[in-house]
Amino acid sequence: MTAAIRHAPASEKRRASVPQPGTTVATSTEERASHFRAAATQIGRALRCADKPAWFSAMFGAGAERFASAPAHEPVAERAAWALVAVRVLGRLAGVLAPDASFAQSLAWFAHADARDFSSLAAQLDRDEPEAIRQIESVRHDDDLRELLPYVLDPHGPGSRLSVMRDPTTKKSRLAKRQNGVFYTPADVAEYMALETLKNHGGVPTQLRCIDPACGTGVFLRAMLRLVHASQPGDRLDYALGFLFGVDVSLLAVEAACFVLLHDCLENVTSRGLTPASAWRALRLNFAAMDVLCVGSPSGHAAGVASENRQHIRATLLGSRCALGALADLTANAASGSAPTSTFTHGIIPLDHLFPEASAGFDLLLANPPYAKIGLRENWGALSRQFDCLGPNASCRSDIYPLFLELTWRFTRADSSAAAVVVPLSIAYHRGRQFTACRRAMLDRGGYWRFAFFDREPHALFGEDVKTRNAIVFRFQDPLGSVRQRARVATGALQKWTSRTRNRLFTGIDFTELEGDCIATGIPKLSGPLQAHVAGILSRREHRLADAWTRLSTCLPARAFDRSDTPRVFVGSTAYNFLNVFRSHMFRRTDRVALSTNPLTALTFESEPLAWRALAILSSRLVFWWWHVHCDGFHVPRWFIESIPFNERSFNAVQKRRLASMAVALWTSLQDHIVVSLNGGRQSVAYRPLACDMERDEIDSILLDAAGVEPSFAEELRRFVRLNAVVDEHDVRRNVIRSHFQKERGTA
């Protein structure tokens, strides 16, 4: 099975749904989506002036919605407008509608009806119809539009939809965020996650039920559909109806997701003589518009009759050319016999009451949850009881995404399943109670966890317009794993890439199993058994740098210019290619430019030798690597400096003298590598040690010897630092960075 499922080749042609050099998914989308939004807005205004469109209730209404209704800020007129836009776009992409076709003719094709059945629509739209059609026709209906379909049909943009649904007053700030870049999941991210879940599940792909609990407009479900049927061709519609399910808080998003899947299944719909409208309604049965956090684990009591009823409705919808007037009645029957939400304990609906087809849970789960706060809720007590990462100290300021990580075991089968969730990188390093509780729950729930980590520079996972650091979290559960006491954990390096190398990004990710399983305080970012072995050695050390100083405080950069008889070492609060470590500013300062106000960490020592040795430790490649292992690749938190596993007790007398001597030599060399930059009209100063190979080689050698680490690890450190800084060896734009690694070795 898995041999037929593989990554797309690196030479794959340009895709509008994947970030490319010089462009992003949001940019490509906005070129088209702005016209669709304009058309939907114009249509929506016209429909709001009319009665509730009968054609919409019959063809697209919420009869299949058992536990939720349309949110207040998603009126029927807006949903109907977007449905008209989507139907027309699908018809144009299929080549069955002429450019001058009316919206009534579009619906007639969609329902296999007579355009005269929709005569009331023409009257409602009146003079607005030509301009709306002109907006839609200003977009080329080509392969790029097919690729971008989930994005151009998203009227809100993913990421902050949940907060708007809960509090409509946040819509203004949400729209402002959209103007700065819409948060889209690129197709290659979704396809990588789908591929890994299929490869590691081991079952027959066309028989595995998949759910996206934050489905939006269907990017992940579309990726699964395309991936499965690229390797095992078959009837796409049958697969989508039987095995793809989604939940989203937005009815607009859910309805758009059905259009996206329908587009990809349209060839099968046509060949079977079905109406697109009937196929759409059949797909709609697989989606729920509600707050997925109010969905609990399967109860085991909802299968049987409910599942058979839904299968009968699907069969009736697809068995013949179902008349338009019968569509609403058929799908409304899917809700018959369902208990009202209030009858469920604490208002939490069991998963199998929502989707009886997955009575034991789903085989696969894919998600990109909202990166937002939970917010004020009436059911806070029920959520606290349901989710391990919410305890008595949780609040409305708690993050949502850790709860979605818990869905990887709550919504999936206990015997055999696979899941993938893309979340912020903070899952790896955040030490707040919610995050430590989430990581402990991962261990306690068992399974095999893998963590792939992605930096935001030089390029970001979601594109240049959405600069985030991310982690893709995989969980695999096999029959043997279900009886294990604790989980297995594997991790990877913090991935960096340029737009030129993105097409190879997902083929080069490797995972390294951790020597221990304690990830409560953080998930280390490691590459290869050697790094994992050294990380284990350093983690077990009892020495901490916090024992070396007399005081640790923060100060403004201007204080580093002050003359002082007190031995001090300063550490920048942020870093990238190196930690900014120095004794005091030695460059010529001009008062005409204000200094940065980003705080420094100031370490005060009892003596100069102690300060010099601290400078050496903090400037080493080993500590820079250790920072990457435990932090986010940008911030240098106080807890990290305190926990560095070296202090005065780590070294013998000879090592102490050598460390202090090399620190003085390094500080002298650093005066030739001062970096002064302007940002926002303020000047910042950094001391770049990348070219100081001789001094850092000696310092690393001393630290490795003191820690009992093999000397060969020094070469791994040199490789790591260079790879982290240069990223792309063939990019001429990075020649300046590359040159820092050549000067001392005479290879320039």
Image (cartoon, rainbow, N blue to C red):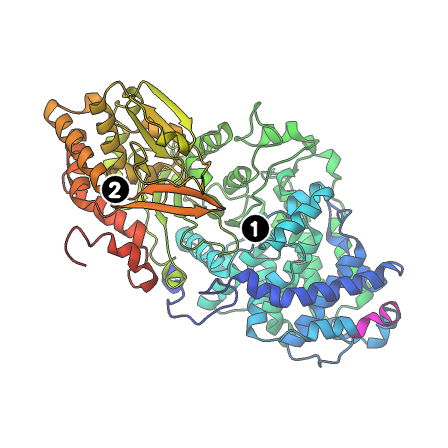
- The location of residue 530, given as percent across then percent down, is 22, 42
**The quadrant where residue 343 appears:** top right
Q: Residue at 43% of width from left, 47% of height from top?
A: 678
Residue at 58% from the left image edge and 23% from the top image edge: 392
Which quadrant is home to the C terminus?
bottom left
Q: Position of residue 115 (x, y in %)?
A: 82, 76
Please state which of residues 668 and 382 is positioned toward the viewer in this rendering: 668
* The disc label shown at residue 671, or none: 2
| Structural crowding at the residue carrying mark 2, measured as other residues with C-alpha within 10 Å and reported as few (<14), some (14–19) or many (≥20) | some
Residue kind at label 2, given as amino acid type: Gln
Q: Nearer the viewer, mark 1 or mark 2?
A: 2
Q: Which residue is mark 1?
A: 212
Name the amino acid, label 1: Asp
Residue 127 in the magenta stretch? The answer is: yes
On the image, the x and y values in percent for residue 670 come to 25, 41
Q: Is residue 399 left or right of residue 592?
A: right
> Which residue in the rendered view is the most extreme toward the left?
654
Instruction: Give the quarter of the figure containing the N terminus.
Output: bottom left
Q: How would you classify the magenta stretch by its main secondary structure?
A: helix
The Cα–Cα distance between marks 1 and 2, rounded to whole angstroms, is 54 Å
Of 494 and 271, the residue lying toward us:
494
Q: Which range of residues does the magenta coloring cover?
A: 123-130
Q: Position of 81 compared to 636: left or right? A: right
Q: From the viewer's perspective, is residue 613 above or below residue 367? A: above
Element type where label 1 sits in the image: strand
Q: Secondary structure at mark 2?
A: loop
Residue 518 visible in the shown view: no
